[in-house]
Image (spheres, grey):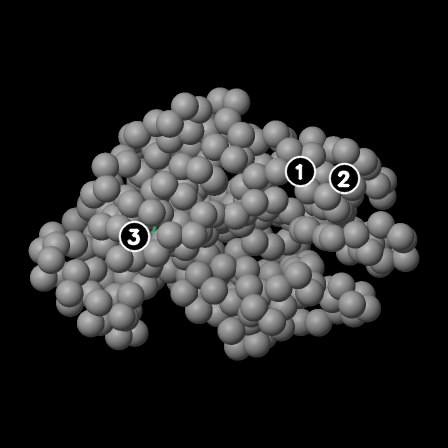
Amino acid sequence: MTIRRDVSLRPFNSFGLEAKSRFFVALEHPDDLLHLMQQDVWHEPRMVLGGGSNVLFAGDFDGLILHNRLQGRELLHQDAESVVLRVASGENWHCLVQDCVEQGWSGLENLALIPGSVGAAPMQNIGAYGAELQDCCQSVSVCFFRDGGHAELSREQCRFGYRDSIFKHELKDKCLITAVTLRLHRRFQPNLRYAALQQHLQAGRQPTLREVFDAVVTIRQSKLPDPAVLGNAGSFFKNPVIAADQAEQLRAQFPGIPLFVQAGQHKVPAAWLIEQCGWKGKRLGAVGAYEKQPLVLVNYGGASGAELLELAGRIRRSVYERFGIVLEPEVNIIGGKLAEV
Ligand code: NAP
Protein backbone atom coordinates (compact mmCIF):
# COMPACT_ATOMS: atom_id res chain seq x y z
CA MET A 1 0.00 0.00 0.00
CA THR A 2 1.55 3.31 -1.08
CA ILE A 3 0.48 6.71 0.16
CA ARG A 4 0.87 9.13 -2.73
CA ARG A 5 0.95 12.93 -2.54
CA ASP A 6 -0.64 15.61 -4.73
CA VAL A 7 -2.44 13.15 -6.94
CA SER A 8 -4.54 14.35 -9.86
CA LEU A 9 -8.15 13.23 -9.42
CA ARG A 10 -9.02 13.71 -13.05
CA PRO A 11 -8.94 9.98 -13.89
CA PHE A 12 -11.06 9.27 -10.81
CA ASN A 13 -14.13 11.46 -11.43
CA SER A 14 -16.60 10.97 -14.26
CA PHE A 15 -17.02 14.75 -14.75
CA GLY A 16 -13.34 14.67 -15.83
CA LEU A 17 -12.57 17.68 -13.59
CA GLU A 18 -9.04 18.62 -12.65
CA ALA A 19 -8.44 18.64 -8.89
CA LYS A 20 -5.73 17.34 -6.62
CA SER A 21 -5.74 15.32 -3.44
CA ARG A 22 -2.97 16.03 -0.95
CA PHE A 23 -2.80 12.33 -0.01
CA PHE A 24 -4.16 9.37 -1.93
CA VAL A 25 -4.19 5.67 -1.21
CA ALA A 26 -5.65 2.74 -3.12
CA LEU A 27 -7.38 0.19 -0.87
CA GLU A 28 -6.99 -3.24 -2.45
CA HIS A 29 -7.42 -5.41 0.62
CA PRO A 30 -9.59 -4.89 3.76
CA ASP A 31 -6.39 -5.04 5.88
CA ASP A 32 -5.01 -1.99 4.05
CA LEU A 33 -7.42 0.08 6.10
CA LEU A 34 -6.10 -1.33 9.39
CA HIS A 35 -2.51 -0.53 8.36
CA LEU A 36 -3.50 2.95 7.34
CA MET A 37 -5.07 3.59 10.74
CA GLN A 38 -1.63 3.23 12.33
CA GLN A 39 -0.20 6.09 10.28
CA ASP A 40 -0.18 9.88 10.89
CA VAL A 41 -1.95 10.50 7.59
CA TRP A 42 -5.04 8.78 9.03
CA HIS A 43 -5.77 11.93 11.05
CA GLU A 44 -6.16 14.05 7.92
CA PRO A 45 -9.68 14.82 6.66
CA ARG A 46 -10.75 11.66 4.83
CA MET A 47 -12.94 10.79 1.91
CA VAL A 48 -13.80 7.45 0.33
CA LEU A 49 -13.91 7.47 -3.45
CA GLY A 50 -15.47 4.63 -5.42
CA GLY A 51 -16.21 4.95 -9.13
CA GLY A 52 -16.14 8.76 -8.87
CA SER A 53 -19.42 8.90 -10.76
CA ASN A 54 -21.36 10.90 -8.19
CA VAL A 55 -18.89 13.57 -7.14
CA LEU A 56 -18.11 17.13 -8.18
CA PHE A 57 -14.66 18.39 -7.21
CA ALA A 58 -15.15 22.15 -6.93
CA GLY A 59 -11.58 22.50 -5.65
CA ASP A 60 -8.60 20.48 -4.44
CA PHE A 61 -9.07 18.02 -1.58
CA ASP A 62 -6.80 18.91 1.31
CA GLY A 63 -6.77 15.51 2.94
CA LEU A 64 -6.63 11.76 2.31
CA ILE A 65 -8.59 10.02 -0.41
CA LEU A 66 -9.24 6.33 0.12
CA HIS A 67 -9.76 4.89 -3.33
CA ASN A 68 -11.84 1.76 -2.92
CA ARG A 69 -10.53 -1.03 -5.16
CA LEU A 70 -11.68 -4.01 -3.09
CA GLN A 71 -12.50 -6.85 -5.49
CA GLY A 72 -14.03 -10.31 -5.19
CA ARG A 73 -17.28 -12.25 -5.23
CA GLU A 74 -18.33 -15.24 -3.19
CA LEU A 75 -21.35 -17.46 -3.71
CA LEU A 76 -22.52 -18.00 -0.13
CA HIS A 77 -25.59 -20.11 -0.77
CA GLN A 78 -27.74 -21.47 -3.56
CA ASP A 79 -30.93 -23.49 -3.80
CA ALA A 80 -33.70 -23.99 -6.35
CA GLU A 81 -35.16 -20.55 -5.69
CA SER A 82 -32.28 -18.20 -5.01
CA VAL A 83 -28.58 -17.49 -4.77
CA VAL A 84 -26.82 -15.44 -2.11
CA LEU A 85 -23.81 -13.58 -3.40
CA ARG A 86 -21.30 -11.49 -1.46
CA VAL A 87 -19.61 -8.84 -3.58
CA ALA A 88 -16.66 -6.67 -2.60
CA SER A 89 -17.49 -2.98 -2.61
CA GLY A 90 -14.88 -1.87 -5.16
CA GLU A 91 -16.42 -3.97 -7.95
CA ASN A 92 -18.13 -2.13 -10.78
CA TRP A 93 -21.92 -2.14 -10.36
CA HIS A 94 -22.89 -2.57 -14.01
CA CYS A 95 -20.41 -5.44 -14.56
CA LEU A 96 -22.00 -7.21 -11.62
CA VAL A 97 -25.52 -6.72 -13.03
CA GLN A 98 -24.39 -7.97 -16.43
CA ASP A 99 -22.72 -11.09 -14.98
CA CYS A 100 -25.79 -11.91 -12.87
CA VAL A 101 -28.02 -11.67 -15.94
CA GLU A 102 -25.66 -14.00 -17.80
CA GLN A 103 -25.94 -16.53 -14.95
CA GLY A 104 -29.75 -16.26 -15.09
CA TRP A 105 -29.94 -14.63 -11.65
CA SER A 106 -32.56 -11.92 -11.55
CA GLY A 107 -33.32 -8.94 -9.33
CA LEU A 108 -30.73 -6.41 -10.50
CA GLU A 109 -31.68 -6.10 -14.19
CA ASN A 110 -33.72 -2.89 -13.80
CA LEU A 111 -30.62 -1.34 -12.20
CA ALA A 112 -28.41 -1.91 -15.25
CA LEU A 113 -26.00 0.81 -16.32
CA ILE A 114 -26.17 2.78 -13.07
CA PRO A 115 -22.62 4.09 -12.89
CA GLY A 116 -20.38 3.57 -9.89
CA SER A 117 -19.18 0.86 -7.58
CA VAL A 118 -21.03 -1.82 -5.61
CA GLY A 119 -20.15 0.01 -2.37
CA ALA A 120 -21.92 3.15 -3.53
CA ALA A 121 -25.18 1.27 -4.18
CA PRO A 122 -26.36 0.98 -0.55
CA MET A 123 -25.35 4.56 0.28
CA GLN A 124 -28.26 5.97 -1.64
CA ASN A 125 -30.23 2.76 -2.09
CA ILE A 126 -29.88 3.10 -5.86
CA GLY A 127 -33.10 2.70 -7.76
CA ALA A 128 -34.40 2.73 -11.30
CA TYR A 129 -37.48 1.62 -13.20
CA GLY A 130 -39.38 0.55 -10.10
CA ALA A 131 -36.57 -1.47 -8.49
CA GLU A 132 -34.26 -0.55 -5.63
CA LEU A 133 -31.13 -2.07 -4.17
CA GLN A 134 -33.00 -2.85 -0.95
CA ASP A 135 -35.23 -5.35 -2.83
CA CYS A 136 -32.22 -7.70 -3.20
CA CYS A 137 -29.89 -6.55 -0.45
CA GLN A 138 -29.53 -9.04 2.39
CA SER A 139 -26.78 -7.28 4.33
CA VAL A 140 -23.94 -4.79 4.09
CA SER A 141 -20.46 -5.37 5.56
CA VAL A 142 -18.65 -2.38 7.04
CA CYS A 143 -15.35 -1.56 8.71
CA PHE A 144 -15.58 1.24 11.27
CA PHE A 145 -13.07 4.07 11.10
CA ARG A 146 -13.02 4.55 14.88
CA ASP A 147 -11.38 1.21 15.72
CA GLY A 148 -11.19 -0.92 12.58
CA GLY A 149 -13.98 -3.19 13.88
CA HIS A 150 -16.15 -5.05 11.37
CA ALA A 151 -19.94 -5.40 11.36
CA GLU A 152 -22.59 -6.97 9.17
CA LEU A 153 -25.65 -4.73 8.95
CA SER A 154 -28.92 -6.42 8.08
CA ARG A 155 -31.21 -4.81 5.52
CA GLU A 156 -33.36 -3.44 8.36
CA GLN A 157 -30.32 -1.97 10.09
CA CYS A 158 -29.37 -0.17 6.85
CA ARG A 159 -32.66 1.80 7.15
CA PHE A 160 -33.13 2.09 3.42
CA GLY A 161 -35.45 4.80 2.13
CA TYR A 162 -36.00 6.62 -1.14
CA ARG A 163 -32.37 7.21 -2.30
CA ASP A 164 -31.49 7.10 1.37
CA SER A 165 -29.89 4.89 4.03
CA ILE A 166 -28.15 4.97 7.40
CA PHE A 167 -24.89 5.62 5.48
CA LYS A 168 -26.11 9.13 4.69
CA HIS A 169 -26.99 9.82 8.34
CA GLU A 170 -25.70 8.10 11.51
CA LEU A 171 -22.92 6.26 9.67
CA LYS A 172 -21.91 9.12 7.37
CA ASP A 173 -18.07 9.26 7.25
CA LYS A 174 -17.92 6.66 10.03
CA CYS A 175 -17.17 3.48 8.07
CA LEU A 176 -16.05 1.90 4.83
CA ILE A 177 -18.60 -0.36 3.14
CA THR A 178 -16.45 -3.39 2.34
CA ALA A 179 -19.01 -5.73 0.75
CA VAL A 180 -22.68 -6.11 -0.12
CA THR A 181 -24.55 -9.42 0.16
CA LEU A 182 -27.38 -9.89 -2.33
CA ARG A 183 -30.16 -12.46 -2.56
CA LEU A 184 -31.03 -13.00 -6.22
CA HIS A 185 -33.72 -15.14 -7.82
CA ARG A 186 -33.44 -18.15 -10.08
CA ARG A 187 -37.07 -17.80 -11.22
CA PHE A 188 -37.58 -14.63 -13.21
CA GLN A 189 -40.51 -12.37 -12.40
CA PRO A 190 -40.21 -9.20 -14.51
CA ASN A 191 -40.80 -5.84 -12.85
CA LEU A 192 -42.42 -3.79 -15.60
CA ARG A 193 -44.11 -1.17 -13.49
CA TYR A 194 -42.55 1.70 -15.42
CA ALA A 195 -44.14 2.67 -18.71
CA ALA A 196 -40.74 3.55 -20.22
CA LEU A 197 -39.69 -0.09 -19.82
CA GLN A 198 -42.96 -1.60 -21.06
CA GLN A 199 -42.75 0.49 -24.22
CA HIS A 200 -39.41 -1.09 -25.10
CA LEU A 201 -40.64 -4.65 -24.74
CA GLN A 202 -42.89 -6.70 -26.98
CA ALA A 203 -46.48 -6.58 -25.75
CA GLY A 204 -48.46 -9.80 -25.27
CA ARG A 205 -45.77 -12.07 -23.85
CA GLN A 206 -43.55 -12.13 -20.82
CA PRO A 207 -40.04 -10.86 -21.62
CA THR A 208 -36.94 -12.82 -20.69
CA LEU A 209 -34.44 -11.60 -18.13
CA ARG A 210 -32.00 -10.74 -20.93
CA GLU A 211 -34.68 -8.74 -22.77
CA VAL A 212 -35.45 -6.63 -19.70
CA PHE A 213 -31.75 -6.00 -19.10
CA ASP A 214 -31.23 -5.06 -22.78
CA ALA A 215 -34.26 -2.73 -22.69
CA VAL A 216 -32.93 -0.87 -19.63
CA VAL A 217 -29.52 -0.53 -21.27
CA THR A 218 -31.07 0.73 -24.51
CA ILE A 219 -33.27 3.31 -22.75
CA ARG A 220 -30.41 4.61 -20.65
CA GLN A 221 -27.97 4.76 -23.55
CA SER A 222 -30.50 6.70 -25.62
CA LYS A 223 -30.90 9.38 -22.93
CA LEU A 224 -27.65 9.53 -21.00
CA PRO A 225 -24.24 10.67 -22.21
CA ASP A 226 -21.30 8.27 -21.91
CA PRO A 227 -18.87 9.85 -19.38
CA ALA A 228 -15.94 8.55 -21.46
CA VAL A 229 -17.15 10.89 -24.22
CA LEU A 230 -18.84 13.72 -22.31
CA GLY A 231 -17.95 14.25 -18.65
CA ASN A 232 -21.00 13.93 -16.36
CA ALA A 233 -22.15 12.45 -13.07
CA GLY A 234 -25.61 11.20 -14.06
CA SER A 235 -28.54 12.97 -12.42
CA PHE A 236 -27.19 16.10 -10.78
CA PHE A 237 -30.26 16.73 -8.60
CA LYS A 238 -32.61 14.39 -6.75
CA ASN A 239 -36.18 14.08 -7.95
CA PRO A 240 -38.00 16.18 -5.35
CA VAL A 241 -40.65 14.66 -3.11
CA ILE A 242 -43.27 17.20 -2.06
CA ALA A 243 -46.29 17.21 0.25
CA ALA A 244 -49.78 16.50 -1.11
CA ASP A 245 -51.06 20.07 -0.60
CA GLN A 246 -48.12 21.60 -2.46
CA ALA A 247 -48.71 19.06 -5.26
CA GLU A 248 -52.37 20.14 -5.48
CA GLN A 249 -51.40 23.80 -5.74
CA LEU A 250 -48.85 23.04 -8.44
CA ARG A 251 -51.32 20.90 -10.38
CA ALA A 252 -53.81 23.79 -10.37
CA GLN A 253 -51.15 26.22 -11.56
CA PHE A 254 -49.37 23.88 -14.03
CA PRO A 255 -51.92 21.31 -15.29
CA GLY A 256 -49.29 19.37 -17.28
CA ILE A 257 -47.02 18.69 -14.31
CA PRO A 258 -46.13 14.98 -13.97
CA LEU A 259 -46.63 13.73 -10.40
CA PHE A 260 -46.09 10.23 -9.02
CA VAL A 261 -47.60 9.31 -5.66
CA GLN A 262 -45.37 7.51 -3.18
CA ALA A 263 -46.37 6.82 0.43
CA GLY A 264 -48.74 9.79 0.48
CA GLN A 265 -46.12 12.12 -0.96
CA HIS A 266 -45.62 13.23 -4.52
CA LYS A 267 -42.51 12.81 -6.65
CA VAL A 268 -41.90 15.37 -9.37
CA PRO A 269 -39.36 14.60 -12.12
CA ALA A 270 -36.58 17.17 -11.67
CA ALA A 271 -35.85 16.92 -15.42
CA TRP A 272 -39.34 18.25 -16.21
CA LEU A 273 -38.92 21.24 -13.86
CA ILE A 274 -35.52 22.06 -15.37
CA GLU A 275 -36.81 21.73 -18.92
CA GLN A 276 -39.76 24.03 -18.17
CA CYS A 277 -37.27 26.68 -17.07
CA GLY A 278 -35.63 26.53 -20.49
CA TRP A 279 -32.40 24.78 -19.53
CA LYS A 280 -32.64 21.68 -21.74
CA GLY A 281 -29.66 21.70 -24.12
CA LYS A 282 -28.52 25.10 -22.86
CA ARG A 283 -24.78 25.68 -22.67
CA LEU A 284 -22.79 28.16 -20.58
CA GLY A 285 -19.21 28.09 -21.86
CA ALA A 286 -17.75 24.64 -21.22
CA VAL A 287 -20.75 23.32 -19.25
CA GLY A 288 -24.40 22.70 -19.98
CA ALA A 289 -27.62 20.79 -19.28
CA TYR A 290 -27.61 17.73 -21.57
CA GLU A 291 -29.83 18.05 -24.64
CA LYS A 292 -31.60 14.69 -24.15
CA GLN A 293 -31.83 14.74 -20.34
CA PRO A 294 -31.40 18.15 -18.69
CA LEU A 295 -31.04 16.62 -15.21
CA VAL A 296 -27.58 15.57 -16.36
CA LEU A 297 -25.05 18.42 -16.31
CA VAL A 298 -22.12 17.93 -18.65
CA ASN A 299 -18.54 19.07 -19.07
CA TYR A 300 -18.01 19.78 -22.78
CA GLY A 301 -14.24 19.79 -22.16
CA GLY A 302 -11.89 21.73 -19.93
CA ALA A 303 -14.59 22.94 -17.52
CA SER A 304 -13.82 23.72 -13.89
CA GLY A 305 -15.82 22.53 -10.91
CA ALA A 306 -16.66 26.17 -10.20
CA GLU A 307 -18.33 26.52 -13.61
CA LEU A 308 -20.45 23.45 -12.97
CA LEU A 309 -21.42 24.78 -9.55
CA GLU A 310 -22.41 28.10 -11.10
CA LEU A 311 -24.62 26.36 -13.68
CA ALA A 312 -26.20 24.13 -11.03
CA GLY A 313 -26.86 27.18 -8.84
CA ARG A 314 -28.55 29.06 -11.68
CA ILE A 315 -30.74 26.08 -12.58
CA ARG A 316 -31.70 25.65 -8.97
CA ARG A 317 -32.63 29.31 -8.58
CA SER A 318 -34.82 29.38 -11.68
CA VAL A 319 -36.68 26.20 -10.64
CA TYR A 320 -37.27 27.73 -7.21
CA GLU A 321 -38.50 31.03 -8.65
CA ARG A 322 -40.93 29.31 -11.00
CA PHE A 323 -42.19 26.37 -8.91
CA GLY A 324 -41.20 27.12 -5.30
CA ILE A 325 -39.27 23.81 -5.18
CA VAL A 326 -35.67 23.68 -3.97
CA LEU A 327 -33.73 21.05 -5.91
CA GLU A 328 -31.24 19.18 -3.75
CA PRO A 329 -28.06 17.85 -5.34
CA GLU A 330 -27.67 14.11 -5.64
CA VAL A 331 -24.01 14.58 -6.53
CA ASN A 332 -21.57 15.03 -3.62
CA ILE A 333 -19.94 18.43 -3.87
CA ILE A 334 -16.39 18.55 -2.50
CA GLY A 335 -14.49 21.78 -1.91
CA GLY A 336 -17.40 24.14 -2.58
CA LYS A 337 -21.13 24.51 -2.18
CA LEU A 338 -24.18 25.49 -4.13
CA ALA A 339 -25.42 29.05 -3.71
CA GLU A 340 -28.51 29.27 -1.51
CA VAL A 341 -31.76 29.95 -3.38
P1 NAP B 1 -37.68 8.90 -15.56
O1 NAP B 1 -37.86 7.45 -15.86
O2 NAP B 1 -37.98 9.91 -16.59
O3 NAP B 1 -38.48 9.24 -14.23
C1 NAP B 1 -38.44 10.55 -13.69
C2 NAP B 1 -39.12 10.55 -12.34
O4 NAP B 1 -40.46 10.08 -12.47
C3 NAP B 1 -38.44 9.69 -11.32
O5 NAP B 1 -38.50 10.36 -10.08
C4 NAP B 1 -39.29 8.44 -11.28
O6 NAP B 1 -39.32 7.89 -9.99
C5 NAP B 1 -40.66 8.98 -11.60
N1 NAP B 1 -41.46 7.97 -12.27
C6 NAP B 1 -41.54 7.72 -13.61
N2 NAP B 1 -42.40 6.70 -13.85
C7 NAP B 1 -42.88 6.31 -12.66
C8 NAP B 1 -43.81 5.29 -12.24
N3 NAP B 1 -44.42 4.50 -13.13
N4 NAP B 1 -44.04 5.17 -10.90
C9 NAP B 1 -43.45 5.96 -10.02
N5 NAP B 1 -42.57 6.93 -10.33
C10 NAP B 1 -42.28 7.11 -11.63
O7 NAP B 1 -36.22 9.16 -14.97
P2 NAP B 1 -34.79 9.21 -15.62
O8 NAP B 1 -34.13 10.41 -15.09
O9 NAP B 1 -34.78 8.92 -17.09
O10 NAP B 1 -34.13 7.96 -14.88
C11 NAP B 1 -34.53 6.63 -15.18
C12 NAP B 1 -34.59 5.83 -13.92
O11 NAP B 1 -33.29 5.78 -13.31
C13 NAP B 1 -35.53 6.43 -12.88
O12 NAP B 1 -36.15 5.38 -12.18
C14 NAP B 1 -34.58 7.20 -11.98
O13 NAP B 1 -35.06 7.41 -10.69
C15 NAP B 1 -33.37 6.27 -12.01
N6 NAP B 1 -32.12 6.93 -11.61
C16 NAP B 1 -31.59 6.57 -10.42
C17 NAP B 1 -30.44 7.15 -9.96
C18 NAP B 1 -29.90 6.71 -8.63
O14 NAP B 1 -30.35 5.76 -8.04
N7 NAP B 1 -28.94 7.40 -8.12
C19 NAP B 1 -29.79 8.10 -10.73
C20 NAP B 1 -30.34 8.44 -11.96
C21 NAP B 1 -31.53 7.85 -12.39
P3 NAP B 1 -38.11 7.03 -9.40
O15 NAP B 1 -36.99 7.99 -9.15
O16 NAP B 1 -38.69 6.48 -8.13
O17 NAP B 1 -37.80 5.99 -10.38
Three-letter amino acid code at the position of disc 2: Arg
Eyeballing the image, is 108 above or below 8? below
- Nearer the observer: mark 2 or 3; the answer is 3
The residue wearing badge 1 is 60
Which SS class for mark 1? loop
Q: Residues within 10 Å of mark 1 (few under 14, many from 20)?
A: some
Three-letter amino acid code at the position of disc 3: Tyr
Quarter occupied by residue 315? top left
Determine whether label 1 and label 3 are within 8 Å by CB: no
Q: CA distance from mark 1 to mark 2?
A: 8 Å
Identify the residue shown where x is 29% and y is 52%: 320
Q: CA distance from mark 1 to mark 3?
A: 30 Å
**Residue 112 position in % (x across, y down):** 43, 47
Q: CA distance from mark 2 to mark 3?
A: 37 Å
Residue 320 is labelled as 3
- Residue 261 shows in the view: no
**Residue 79 position in % (x across, y down):** 53, 68
Determine whether label 1 and label 2 are within 8 Å by CB: yes
Q: Residues within 10 Å of mark 3 (few under 14, many from 20)?
A: some
Which SS class for mark 3? helix
Residue 22 is labelled as 2
